[in-house]
């Protein structure tokens, strides 16, 4: 993956992150206790979903950076 490809991906991720922040900041405190069902982990609150998302996203960023360094 070339550096320009990484920058395109990073720019897209930043835009998506800003959109997510807008949606999250508009929520009420009780909204974080709402639940959804994950196919592997079962019922999870929104707060847990957000934690899971951040860890999962960090993993993908780590893999992207590793691949960049391999070039």
Image: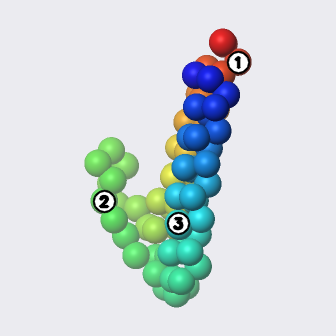
Does residue 51 sit above or below 11 in this rendering?
Answer: below
* Label 2 to label 1: alpha-carbon separation: 36 Å
Camera-nearest label, 2 or 1? 1
Residue, disc 3: 20
Q: Which mark is residue 2?
A: none
Q: Position of residue 41 (x, y in %)?
A: 37, 49
Q: Which residue is mark 2?
A: 37
* CA gap, disc 2 and disc 3: 19 Å
Q: Residue at x 58, y 79 (%)?
A: 25
Residues 16 and 56: in front is 16
- List x then y, in percent, for residue 52: 51, 52
Q: Residue at x 61, y 48 (%)?
A: 11
Depth check, front residue: 16 or 7: 7
The answer to whether residue 45 is visible is yes
Q: Which residue is mark 1?
A: 69
Task: Tell me the SS state at disc 2.
Answer: strand
Assign a secondary structure to mark 1: helix
């Amino acid at each position: 993956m070339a550096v320009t490809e990484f920058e395109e991906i990073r720019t897209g991720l930043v835009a998506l992150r800003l959109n997510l922040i807008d949606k999250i900041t508009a929520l009420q405190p009780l909204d974080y206790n709402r639940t959804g069902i994950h196919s592997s982990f079962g019922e999870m609150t929104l707060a847990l979903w957000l934690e899971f998302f951040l860890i999962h996203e960090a993993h993908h960023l780590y893999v992207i950076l590793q691949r960049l360094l391999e070039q």
